[in-house]
Image (cartoon, coloured by chain):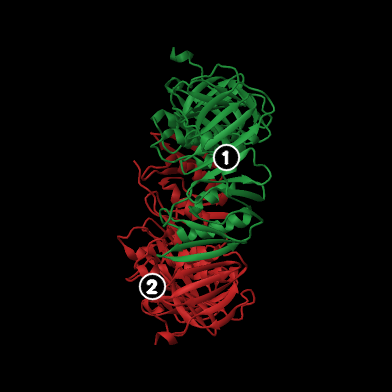
Chain colours: A red, B green
Amino acid sequence: MKGHKIMIQFTINKNAFLSAMRIAKQAIGSKIAIPVLSKLKIQVTSEGIHFTASNGQISIEKLLPANDKDAGMLIDSEGAILLEANFFDSIVAQLPDITFTFEEIENYQVKLSSGKSEITLKGQQPELYPMIQQITAKPSTKIAVGELKELFNETAFAVSTQESRPILTGVNIQLIDHQNLQAVATDSHRLSQRRIKLESFGEDFQVVVPNRAINSFRSVFSNDEDTISVFLNATQILFKNSTINFYSRLVEGNYPDTDRLIPDPSLYSLNLILDVADFLHAMNRAKLLTAGLQGGTVKLSVHDDKLMLTVNTPEVGSSFEELTMLEKSGQDIEISFNPQFLIDALRVLKEPKVKISFISNVRPFTLVPKDDSENFIQLITPVRTN
Amino acid sequence: MKGHKIMIQFTINKNAFLSAMRIAKQAIGSKIAIPVLSKLKIQVTSEGIHFTASNGQISIEKLLPANDKDAGMLIDSEGAILLEANFFDSIVAQLPDITFTFEEIENYQVKLSSGKSEITLKGQQPELYPMIQQITAKPSTKIAVGELKELFNETAFAVSTQESRPILTGVNIQLIDHQNLQAVATDSHRLSQRRIKLESFGEDFQVVVPNRAINSFRSVFSNDEDTISVFLNATQILFKNSTINFYSRLVEGNYPDTDRLIPDPSLYSLNLILDVADFLHAMNRAKLLTAGLQGGTVKLSVHDDKLMLTVNTPEVGSSFEELTMLEKSGQDIEISFNPQFLIDALRVLKEPKVKISFISNVRPFTLVPKDDSENFIQLITPVRTN
């Protein structure tokens, strides 16, 4: 039997190989759940080279097609093998020539030849690698990578980092009325909800995607123009384009009903229009004065035509500054909050002006882009001070 | 008394202030020996603003002159105060306007005003800061910053990181015959010795400068064209230009006599000329195969007209490559060594070709630039293998 084992052999451009491999390798984090997951699976077929990597939660399959124009791939013999991912990457990166030959030899070893250099590495039999559970359903919807990244970017920062309520560590993603894709994240102190209208129709769904998968998604799918299909089953989501399958486990459990948290606009007692950049800079200064203090707050006071921001931290000092209000309608207020929440909220606003609406100094206030208040809303809970 | 205390007040360009302050601040490391050394001393005189910072071993005084053209300094009142260095830096960096006013108020507090922002910080009385011991001797010699950096760069990598022999953690610097500046560093496994001829004459000296001071020196003195004076006393060295005093404690003890380690050229049994870049790349590959292994070695074999490099690490794999010899004279050899030592040695060679000379496979071998063998020599001890 052993004598008949298929042994891989191919020659390829080093950089094309590395680029493709590193897309899959992103699934491997710094914490390795089980030893075999520090390995990369390389499978060579007539289609090309398939790279598979996983951390148990996220699995990525990347195909470098046999006809890829940058790869100049010459496959002499197909097969599959496991190699230590980071070590293999560092070795390939140091090969002297622009191409190299990858040749499997006896006992699951691999010989890499490049220029006058020859390196032999220990591998393992591919059967040791866990099966990636496939999703066979038809796609739920299609979406441009850039749109999905934007949706994630505008919400994922608000997820909880506390494992005490695991459901809040993910982003709640829903397809509503076949065409409206909505993402919500909250850590119970602040919330961000974004909705976009898709070009194509799909079947309604609701899933909670872990934040770790969202972070990986951004770097794995680098071409914002690309369109990907979204597939679902009971426990997994799959984002797929022509060469990448990106699987993530879903967060289990029921996401809280966040719609009831969004205030009715009739309740607002004060609406302000502020310049996003000015407000963000002021919050960055305020944050410095609260730095290192659990629960440090900034006080925002609106009196007549003046908006004042005050921080008072007896241990280190105090700050006071005025901020220009572009528009004001409603009653004066004094309200305190964590400046980091405002920094996070303002950073993801692409429009230059923000509308902030207050009910009272003990109720959450909202931020919406001045000229698109329908599709993007953020809530921040104030801190009660005495 | 309190009512008559002098209170600082000045207005200044933010970036000019930050640049000058950050030169002094480099003395403050991540480990704070005594609490007051996390502070920066700011002293305002008719000369300008003096910044002082120290980690107990290294002390830096930087003057931002009153007439500095970028600073646009307006001094209303002189004085001195201590401020928490990193916190103060981050606050100033976030000020909204390009200029700010620094005003000392009651109880050693400082009020910073910039644009519509006003920040009050707690400071401390300047008398709490330790005295920097001054050096009153006349300068020992003068040298261009670029030359001294080069001397440090070519030797300091070889210092010992082991505290068991503290004397080896510094670079041994000697002025010989009033004009030849020599630096030597060794960790007892490898050694680097560099000599340069100064333009000006000085009084002979011998001191051991700690590696930490050498690292700081490189970033504190950024202008390679600048000429600095070197001052010495029994325990300290001072590098000084028109606005910076850079003090370092010396390493105490007698530096070993390293001259006797340099082999007599008549002993060499083999001399090779190699391309530095090719050799360095090969060593980088060899190092990967020994990575993570204490005492991993590469074997260099010269047989007739072939030079071969071999690594065999049973746990992970093996590598084999040929390297072109540009010249060879002498007998064949097989010798093993730590590839990291070669990487460090080759990296600091600016010439494209290196001459390597061997006595036997158990004696240290030497590297010199092919066309400047007089002033720069490195020794590497081989590893005995069986």
Drawn side of residue A243 relative to residue A386, left or right: right
Can I make out residue A276 in this image? yes
Disc 1 to disc 2, how far (Cα)? Answer: 68 Å
**Which quarter of the rendering shows the C terminus of chain A?**
top left
Q: Position of residue A138 (x, y in %)?
A: 46, 85
Question: Splitting the image into 4 quarters, where does residue B160 fall?
Answer: top left
- Name the chain letter of the residue that bears numbered label 2: A
Drawn side of residue B79 relative to residue B145, left or right: left
- Name the chain letter of the residue that bears numbered label 1: B
Nearer to us: label 1 or label 2 = 1
Q: Which label is found at residue A144?
A: none
**Identity of the amino acid at label 1?**
Asp
Dot 2: what SS? strand
Q: Name the residue nearer the viewer: B343 or B258.
A: B258
In this rendering, the count of numbered labels is: 2
**Which quarter of the rendering shows the N terminus of chain A?**
bottom left
- Mark 1 and 2 residues: CB-CB less than 8 Å, in contact? no
Q: Position of residue B246 (x, y in %)?
A: 55, 28
Residue indicated by mark 1? B264
Can I make out residue A301 in this image? no
Placement of B227 over or under A246, stated as above or below:
above
Placement of B268 over or under B333, stated as above or below:
above
The residue positioned 48% from the left and 53% from the top of the image is B337
Q: Position of residue A40 (x, y in %)?
A: 45, 71
Residue indicated by mark 2? A249
